[in-house]
Image (cartoon, rainbow, N blue to C red):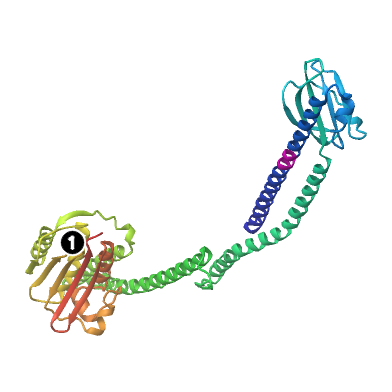
């Protein structure tokens, strides 16, 4: 069953059931009120008859005495303790009342009797009879008019319920369509995307901000993200293919050269082996960076721990000095404890310091400052710098400020892109400030409330 039909059926059935329950509750409540009022009235009439019988006993015949109090369409009878009827008077011809068996009631009793599908109010009161024994004065009064009123009420409730089902049926269908139409549009859009391969959007109306609108907005945002990721993937594949093409071509050329003349020419042999080895190392380095860049933030597997800033940065600067023989000046304004992933932060700092090493000859400065809300690390060099129009693009994958300069330095245009991903994974941001001929400053800013 389709979802629209389920909504239609379930909504209609639910409201019909509620209407029926309400109708039954109204009918039963009204019946109880009506019958209770009639029983109280019959009880008052029985007490009047009791007073008349008690006060005039011996003066008149019992039959004549109680006839003055018998209600129309009812009956009064005196029942002795042995069950015998001492007197019976009916208001009109009611053989169904006379035929009913009489039962002595010791105390005051009220009840509703159904005789031949007609309700009767029944009241029994104790009375002192002529010989001093306690008899039972029983008054039975018809409630046929009340039964007719209840029948009319029942008819009205049934008709109103049936009439209410018609707009209810229509409104349930409209409600189902209101809910299903956006879902149907979503399904058709997804089918269109699958057939055409294009990233389509759903038109949204800003008149309402309900969940259906939010679903459309979320779908459109998802399409934007998928389209952006698809374009990035295409660009990534294209750039990766381009970057890998050059070392593979060099390796293929030198391999062919070795195959033809390498055995006889020793200098050519060594030149070819060196070139192949160099390009193989470049490919290995490039592949490792590509694999790191392929990770998503949730796959970084961070191990956040508390670290002293001075101790952490000292280990980074000492390791870098020993590895590259370059002086690193460490400046920490105030030592403090921060929470971060030590290995990921070191990897990030090595990328930025390696860039400073490649494009400068002097010392490299690493300055750290810790404030209440944020803490910051600056990597400063006095190298060649980056042109102002190139700065907005330096974090793009495979972007190179100068093709020849990066080739000479062994860069691929991936380091800063990886640094940006690492910084975000650690809950921070990275930016570059640079002037041509004066140097570059890489600024890392982290939130201490992480």
SS class of the residue under badge 1? Answer: helix
Q: Residue at x 11, y 78 (%)?
A: 382
Q: Residue 305: x, y in percent?
A: 20, 53
The quadrant of the rendering that contains the C terminus is: bottom left
Q: Residue at x 85, y 23 (%)?
A: 101
Q: Is residue 34 magenta?
A: yes
Q: Nearer the viewer, residue 340 or 417?
A: 340
Q: Residue 10: x, y in percent?
A: 65, 52
- In the image, the segment drawn in magenta is 31-37
Which quadrant of the figure has residue 66? Answer: top right
Q: Residue 19: x, y in percent?
A: 69, 51
For mark 1, what is the residue? 346
Question: Would residue 417 appear left or right of 85 to someone viewing this image?
Answer: left
Tell me if residue 228 comes above or below residue 104 in the rendering: below
Q: Is residue 301 visible?
A: yes
Which quadrant of the figure has residue 69? Answer: top right
Is the residue marked by circle 1 packed among few (<14), some (14-19), or many (20+) residues within 10 Å? some
Q: Main secondary structure of the magenta part?
A: helix
The quadrant of the rendering that contains the N terminus is: bottom right
Q: Nearer the viewer, residue 76 or 364?
A: 76
Tell me if residue 28 comes above or below residue 65 in the rendering: below
Q: Residue 411: x, y in percent?
A: 22, 73
Residue projecting furthest to the front: 59
Q: Nearer the viewer, residue 424 or 192?
A: 424
Q: Tell how many labels.
A: 1
Q: Is residue 112 visible?
A: no
């Amino acid at each position: 069953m389709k979802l629209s039909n389920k909504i239609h059926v379930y909504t209609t059935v639910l409201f019909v059931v509620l209407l029926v329950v309400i109708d039954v509750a109204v009918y039963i409540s009204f019946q109880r009120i009506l019958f209770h009022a009639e029983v109280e009235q019959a009880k008052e009439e029985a007490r009047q008859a009791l007073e008349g019988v008690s006060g005039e006993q011996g003066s008149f015949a019992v039959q004549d005495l109680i006839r003055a109090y018998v209600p129309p369409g009812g009956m009064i009878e005196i029942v002795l303790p042995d069950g015998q009827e001492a007197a019976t008077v009916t208001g009109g011809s009611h053989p169904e009342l006379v035929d009913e068996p009489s039962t002595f009631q010791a105390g005051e009793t009220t009840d509703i009797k159904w005789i031949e599908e007609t309700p009767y109010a029944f009241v029994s009161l104790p009375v002192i009879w002529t010989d001093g024994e306690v008899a039972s004065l029983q008054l039975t009064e018809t409630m046929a008019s009340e039964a007719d009123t209840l029948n009319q009420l029942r008819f009205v409730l049934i008709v109103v319920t049936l009439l209410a089902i018609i707009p209810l049926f229509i409104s349930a269908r409209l409600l189902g369509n209101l809910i299903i139409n956006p879902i149907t549009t979503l399904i058709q859009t997804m089918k269109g995307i699958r057939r055409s391969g294009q990233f389509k959007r759903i038109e949204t109306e800003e008149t309402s901000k309900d969940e259906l609108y939010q679903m459309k907005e979320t779908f459109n945002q998802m399409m934007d993200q998928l389209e952006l990721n698809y374009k990035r993937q295409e660009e990534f594949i294209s750039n990766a293919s381009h970057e890998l093409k050059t070392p593979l071509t060099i390796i293929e050329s030198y391999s062919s050269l070795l195959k033809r003349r390498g055995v006889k020419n020793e200098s050519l042999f060594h030149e070819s082996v060196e070139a192949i080895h160099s390009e193989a190392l470049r490919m290995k380095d490039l592949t490792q960076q590509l694999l790191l860049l392929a990770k998503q933030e949730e796959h970084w597997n961070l191990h956040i721990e508390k670290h002293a800033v001075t101790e952490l940065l000292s280990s980074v600067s000492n390791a870098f000095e020993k590895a590259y023989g370059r002086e690193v000046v460490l400046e920490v304004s105030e030592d403090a404890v921060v929470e971060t992933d030590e290995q990921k932060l070191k990897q990030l700092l090595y990328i930025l310091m390696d860039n400073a090493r490649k494009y400068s000859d002097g010392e490299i400065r690493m300055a750290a400052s810790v404030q209440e809300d944020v803490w910051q690390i600056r990597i400063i060099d006095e190298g060649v710098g980056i042109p102002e129009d190139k700065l907005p693009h330096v974090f793009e994958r495979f972007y190179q400020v100068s093709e020849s300069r990066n080739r000479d330095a062994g860069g691929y245009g991936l380091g800063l892109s990886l640094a940006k991903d690492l910084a975000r994974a650690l809950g921070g941001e990275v930016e570059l400030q640079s002037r041509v001929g004066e140097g570059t400053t890489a600024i890392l800013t982290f939130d201490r409330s992480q």
